[in-house]
Image: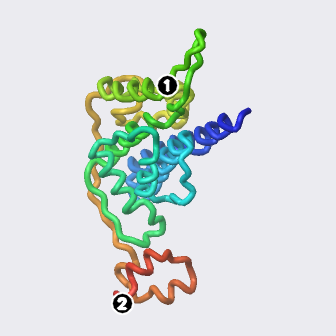
Amino acid sequence: MEIDALLNDFATRSFRDTADMDYIAARMSYRAGLVEQFHWQGLQALEKYLKAILLYNRVKAKRIGHDLTKALEKAKQLPFELELTTPALQLIEHLDKFGRFRYLEASYYIHGPKLVELDRTVWEIRRYCRVLNYKINNPDGSVTQMLPIELERIEKSKYVHPHKLRIIGGALEKILDKKDDAARGSLVWQNGFFGKKHRKTVTMRIPRQGKNSPLSLHPEMLDELKEYVYVSKEIIEAYSGQS
């Protein structure tokens, strides 16, 4: 295989397909009321989708980590603009704020239909999560640049039912097509964006929950805690001087 094909395969299998699994896991966590896990898994899904898009388009992004803001900043180097709605950008900001703190180093809260917001955001970002910038050699010797055509298809997707947009060979699509897949129920449950038919409404519990970090309650333990476990520079700076 040529190196371009290998890099695209890595973007698909290591980033997009894995992001699809993280997305389903986030839906499962939300349904079970596991807010911290929902935050982390949702962030992981969006992070990997964005990294896939960057790799498909050969944008160097080695120092993004789990920072969605950095990923979106890198996305400005793409040969096209990621068109994301305000609700999607707000959900990204929410997950960026709370999702990366896996050990309750920082307090969190959740309110509103965050699962619906995640479904929408995944759908919006995932539209770009494939090879878009390629060309076709025509029989007459001419060359067709496909990026404008692919972007037009993405633009038109806003005007059809979301479930009709499919990625050929996508992991989510394979799960949807296999009725006995163990993950299918968790993917389609109250999902207005991914499924086999149009869903006009969804019904689910809207959580209103928050949890204080142990460090926010007792910042005086910070110096001693650092002797036993890793504490990020960001957290150290946030709690230093509060005891």
For image coordinates 30% across by 58% down, the residue present is: 110
Dot 1 amino acid type: Met
Q: Residue furthest front?
A: 141
Vertical placement of 35 versus 118: above or below? below
Place of residue 118 in the rendered image (x, y in percent of width and height, measured from the top left): 37, 45
Residue 53 percent coordinates (x, y): 50, 42
Quarter residue 171 falls in: top right
Q: Give the answer, above or below, for where 34 lies relative to 86.
A: below
The answer to whether residue 46 shows anywhere in this view is yes
Q: Residues within 10 Å of mark 1 (few under 14, many from 20)?
A: some
Residue 222 higher or lower than 208, as above or below: below
Residue that protrudes farthest toward the top in the picture: 140
Q: Is residue 183 rendered to the left or right of residue 93? A: right
From the image, tell me which residue sits under label 2: 243
Give the residue number, with chain letter if any, for mark 1. Answer: 146
Q: CA distance from mark 2 to mark 1?
A: 59 Å
